[in-house]
Amino acid sequence: MKKSKNAFPKISKIFIFVLLTVFCVQLFTSSVSAEETAAKAEISIQADETIKVVVGDKTWLYPRKVVGTPTGGRENHTYPTLDQVAASNYIVADMETEEVLLGHRVDDVAYPASMTKIMTALTVIESPDFDLNKPVVFSEYSVALPSPVSARAGFVAGEETTTENALYLMMVQSANECARALAETYGGTEANFANMMNELAANIGCENTHLVDAAGFGLDDHHFTPRDLVKIIKRAMTHETFRKLVSTRAYASEPTSYHPYTAWTMVVNSNYLMLQGDLNLSSAYLHTFDGVKTGNTDIAGNCLSATVHTYDGRHLCGIIFNGSLADQPGEFFSVSVLLRTLLEEGAKAANCPTETEAYQFLADNPQIAKEVGGFQDLCHISQLYKDGQLSDEQIAALVEYANQENGIVAEESSQSDTIGKVVADPSDQSAQTGKADKNKQNQQLSTNEENINSTSEMSNSFLSFLGQRKLQYILFGMWILLFLVIVVLTVHTILKFKSKKPKFEPESESVLKSESDSES
């Protein structure tokens, strides 16, 4: 009687069943885990144009303004290594904690040149009578600069402008006559204003800072230390007005008493890390440069300070004094490239994650990626607004349109028909900046909160009963069971193979007899 052949014995069926079960549990666990992560994520827009994602004790920070690919591709770019950077002093510090991540002579005096204007702007902004619309009148002294090649906007003696216009030209172009005129306006004389700067520096906690003028022409008795300047920049960046000044890439002057037309002078930021830091000077460890200032004199050499973010939420401040290439001392070399190297090395020293790691987190958490991507889709609007190219009403209309494109319900804007208008006075626009941005961000964040809450309700219905940790234990047990099944199946296969091995049996008598007859 023949035995029926079964291609799938019971033990094979058990093996397949267990394998499928483990796969399904793994898939379900991953899905629930991703939903739970999204539910716990806190996503917010920061004042410095970044997107902050907090999940438990882990923080991620993403750029709100997404730029294109660097010329030729970042992989083809080459930059100096740390040992190729020469400087009298340098520092890279975490601005929040003031922890020094990388440094050279951080407590020794250094000559700042036009980086002095950081302190000039801060002293003006913190003056009791500070007002962006306060008139600034240029004296004979303020326009009589010590060198014909000194940076200047082009004001003449007796000309009047606003504090806001003078601040922008001083910080974007590094206009020296504006620094002097602001000092006289808010200090009476430049010497008295220098005393105000020194008092403020001491109040901030600076230990070896002494300034004698507002523009940075001072020599031996005019200095900071790198650590002191980090403290000053940290204080300055708490002011919204200062952040706008140092993050402006290009500026067109407002009309004055002598120059009656808008854009009589147009300037570009002298800090190349603000212009190219997120594109052709980009790094896998850094994003969203948002300040600060250049400086150059014979005694100070080539100087630069800059602030930038890392993907784990650090806000780094880097400063280099008298920078050059180590093998070309004294020769001019782009200080922006040198400071980029220092900032990247500082981020590495702090074990900051790379761009790849940050976006892998989004790839693993699609719900969070969707929220972050939604904010990045609107970045071009905020950038135009920050640059003073759109009015309050235009922004409201554009945000409403973009929200509708992204499936977000937005309140109807009564000013939607003003999209084609052009702002005539940049100062009016600047006075309205905070209001529109806050309304836009509150609207987006409330939508985010609703989405996150709905996700939380779906995922927690099961997790409240079982819990994520118990799911992990169950999955671990399933893998052990699968291992045991594989062992049993292997043993069964070996035994079965042995049982089918052919054995020697004596031939039957009839066969032997027939062979005997044939022989005879």
Image (cartoon, grey):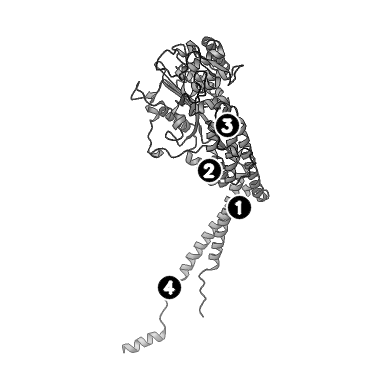
The answer to whether residue 252 shows anywhere in this view is yes
Helix, strand or loop at disc 1?
A: helix
Earlier residue among tags 1 and 2: 2
- Label 3 is placed on what type of residue? Ala
The residue where tag 1 is placed is 474
Earlier residue among tags 2 and 4: 2
For mark 3, does the 10 Å Cα neighbourhood hold few (<14), some (14 to 19), or many (20 or more) residues?
Answer: few
Residue toward you, 89 or 46:
46
- Label 2 is placed on what type of residue? Phe
How far apart marks 3 and 4 lie (CA) works out to 82 Å
How far apart marks 1 and 3 lie (CA) works out to 44 Å
- Where residue 122 appears, x then y in whole percent? 55, 20
Helix, strand or loop at disc 4?
A: loop
Q: Quadrant of residue 149?
A: top left
Tags 3 and 4 touching, CB below 8 Å: no
Helix, strand or loop at disc 2?
A: helix
Which disc is residue 196 wearing? none
Q: Quadrant of residue 518?
A: bottom left
Q: Answer above or below: position of 328 versus 10.
A: above
The residue where tag 3 is placed is 47
The residue located at (61%, 40%) in the rendering is 444
How far apart marks 1 and 2 lie (CA) works out to 25 Å
- Label 1 is placed on what type of residue? Ile
- Label 4 is placed on what type of residue? Pro
Earlier residue among tags 3 and 4: 3
